[in-house]
C-alpha cells in the first residue's frame, strides 16, 4: 500500500499549525510542521518530498522570501500559499513565483484538499516525466552514434535528404539507419520514435 502523502505546514501561528494538521491527518495525510521558513530551510535537502503549505506573513522571513530561497536551493516542492484577508496582491506575486494555488484564512477543508490535489498532481507529473526521460535515455543509449545523429535530425523535423547531406551519406543510408532506430527503440511508427527522442530532450532548440 502506498505511503500517505506528506504536507509540510510552515506557519508561525500555533493555532493554524494545529488546525491544519488536524484537518490533514483526518484526511489521511502525513504532516510535518515548521514554526518558520528559516527552520524549514535549515532542514533543506534533508526534508522529505511533499507539498508545502506556506504562510505569507511570518517574522524573520516571509512566505515570498521562503519561496525564493527554495527555488535558489533547488527544493522543487510544490507550494500552496496561505494568506490573511487582504493579502491578494502578495498571493498573486507568490503565484507568479511558481506557487500552485493560494487559500485565504480561515479556509475550509474542501478548499485545502482541492489546492493540495493540484500540488500533488504536479509532483506525480514531474516523477512520471523523470521516469519517461530516464527510460528514453536508456533506449537511446542502445543506438550507434550515427543512429543518434539521424534521430536528432528527425527530431528537429529535417527530411531524409537534408540529414543525408549534413552527414555526407546517401538518403538510402539514412533510411537504413531509420529502420534500425525503429527496431532498437521498439517503435511501431516514426511518431513513437520521436516521442522517445523528445522525452530524452532531443529536438529542443537552445534557449
Image: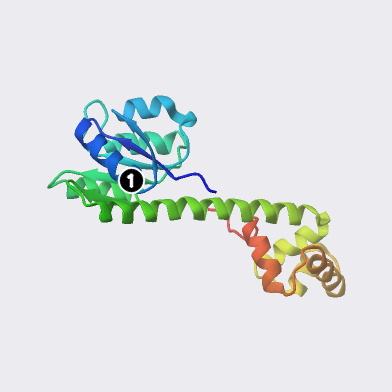
Is 145 situated above or below 53?
below
Residue drawn at (26%, 47%) of the image: 93
- For image coordinates 80% across by 61% down, the residue present is 147
Rendering coords of residue 85 (x, y %): 13, 46
- Give 126 or 202, whichever is nearer the viewer: 126
Q: Is residue 132 above or below residue 11?
A: below
* Total count of labels: 1
Q: Nearer the viewer, residue 34 or 153?
A: 34
User: Where residue 202 sits: x, y (%)?
Assistant: 65, 58
Is 78 situated left or right of 207 in this image?
left
On the image, which quarter does residue 56 sit in? Answer: top left
**Mark 1 surroundings: few (<14), some (14-19) or many (≥20) residues within 10 A:** few
Q: Is residue 170 visible?
A: no
Instruction: Say left or right for 48 vs 162.
Output: left
- Is residue 44 visible to us here? yes
- Judge whether 190 appears above or below 148 on screen: below
Q: Residue at x 28, y 37 (%)?
A: 63
Location of mark 1 (residue): 26
Q: Secondary structure at mark 1?
A: loop
Q: Position of residue 203 (x, y in %)?
A: 63, 61
Image check: 63 left or right of 192?
A: left
Residue 133 lies in what quarter of the image? bottom right
Amino acid at each position: 500500500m502506498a505511503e500517505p502523502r506528506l504536507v509540510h505546514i510552515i506557519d508561525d501561528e500555533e493555532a493554524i499549525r494545529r488546525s491544519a494538521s488536524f484537518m490533514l491527518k483526518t484526511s489521511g495525510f502525513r504532516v510535518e510542521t515548521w514554526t518558520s521558513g528559516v527552520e524549514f530551510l535549515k532542514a533543506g535537502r534533508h526534508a522529505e518530498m511533499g507539498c508545502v503549505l506556506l504562510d505569507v506573513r511570518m517574522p524573520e522571513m516571509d512566505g515570498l522570501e521562503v519561496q525564493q530561497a527554495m527555488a535558489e536551493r533547488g527544493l522543487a516542492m510544490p507550494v500552496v500559499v496561505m494568506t490573511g484577508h487582504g493579502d491578494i496582491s502578495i498571493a498573486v506575486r507568490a503565484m507568479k513565483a511558481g506557487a500552485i494555488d493560494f487559500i485565504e484564512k480561515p479556509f475550509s477543508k474542501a478548499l485545502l484538499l482541492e489546492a493540495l490535489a493540484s500540488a500533488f498532481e504536479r509532483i506525480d507529473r514531474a516523477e512520471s516525466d523523470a521516469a519517461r526521460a530516464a527510460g528514453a535515455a536508456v533506449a537511446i543509449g542502445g543506438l550507434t552514434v550515427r543512429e543518434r545523429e539521424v534521430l536528432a535530425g528527425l527530431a528537429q523535423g529535417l527530411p531524409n535528404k537534408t540529414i543525408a547531406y549534413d552527414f555526407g551519406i546517401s538518403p538510402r543510408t539514412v533510411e537504413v539507419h531509420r529502420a534500425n532506430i525503429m527496431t532498437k527503440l521498439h517503435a511501431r511508427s516514426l511518431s513513437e520514435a520521436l516521442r522517445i527522442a523528445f522525452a530524452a530532450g532531443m529536438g529542443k532548440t537552445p534557449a
